[in-house]
Image: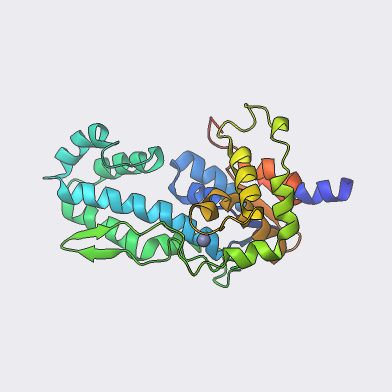
Amino acid sequence: METSRGREHNPASYFLDTSTQIGRRWADEQISRKVRDDLFGKKLRCSIYVEREYRCRVLNQLIKLHIFVTASKDVEEAEQRLEKCKHEIDIDDLFYNIGKRLLKKYNSKKPLIRYLERLIEVDWENFFYDAVPRSLCDMTNCTRGADAPKYQHGYYLTIPTKCPNNCKIYDFWNSKRADLQNLAQIDTSKFAKTNDPKGTMGQIQNEAQAILGGKSPHGDPCRTVSDAVISIEARDSYPGITIHTMDYDFELLKNILNTQVRFFKAYKTA
Ligand SMILES: [Zn+2]
């Protein structure tokens, strides 16, 4: 126990979960710096499934900002309208803050739009693969979030976030039957409301039971149990690796799936 605990405290390599990948680049500067410091000097690994989950969130949020700025008369007007339009343009807190910062930084529309376009087309990838080798594991072949953003008449269309028919999640769960059974038997009463405020463990348990009962794991279920998929991919693709995450769900899953987890708490609320 002592040795495994020691390894956990100072692992040589980290598997970056989507939340860490987002946190190390897109969170407020103070937080993203803390995340980068925590990763410094480690070997970093990731997966294609995480890359696509990242694209679903980051690219679509950037596209919504791009649409908003493009449709605004100028930077001043965009800055004035951003708060009022936050829900209308369906932007989350993280990217709302990014939008606010950018609108302060740029004083004209064109260079800001060019900057957003570069992020959407190229730079997101440089950030994602910063210190991460390109050859990533892919146990599901799920192409949710893999489509390139389409550009039409000056606007991007958000990328589809639906798990497609060719996702191999069925084969994945077939080969990870024991994990699926463990997930179906989660003792949710053990997780007090304070531990699992989003109720994720209950949702994962329900889906795992349904999949075992014959429900197709395609589509929404693929996303519902994505934290479990990522945990298993990390554990089995990179033996001994520690999952680095800012999402407490991984901490809740670690004893069920026998993973090593570093939950990095940088936000005030979990
Ligand atoms: Zn899928």
State left or right for residue 12 relative to residue 38. right
Pick whichever, 267 or 51, lies toward us.
51
Quarter of the C terminus within the rendering = top right
Kindly identify the residue that appears in the image at 62 percent across and 38 percent down: 202
Residue 51 in the image, given as x and y percentages of width and height: 50, 61
**The furthest residue to the bottom:** 135
Q: Residue pushed farthest front?
A: 214
Q: Is residue 41 left or right of residue 86?
A: right
Q: Where's residue 182, x and y in %?
A: 74, 49
The number of discs equals 0
Q: Nearer the viewer, residue 103 or 95?
A: 95
Residue 236: x and y in percent read 71, 63
Against 139, residue 248 (above or below) is above
- Res 259 seen here: no
Q: Is residue 211 visible?
A: yes
Q: Residue at x 33, y 60 (%)?
A: 120
Instruction: Tell whether 102 sits left or right of 43.
Output: left
Residue at the location (52% across, 59% down)? Answer: 218
On the image, the x and y values in percent for residue 226 come to: 57, 52
When asked about the image quadrant of residue 144, the answer is bottom left
Residue at coordinates 30% horizontally, 39% vertically from top-left? Answer: 100
Q: In the rendered view, how is the structure colored?
A: rainbow
User: Where 60 falls versus 76 (above or below)?
Assistant: below
Q: Is residue 112 left or right of residue 229?
A: left
Q: Quadrant of residue 82?
A: top left
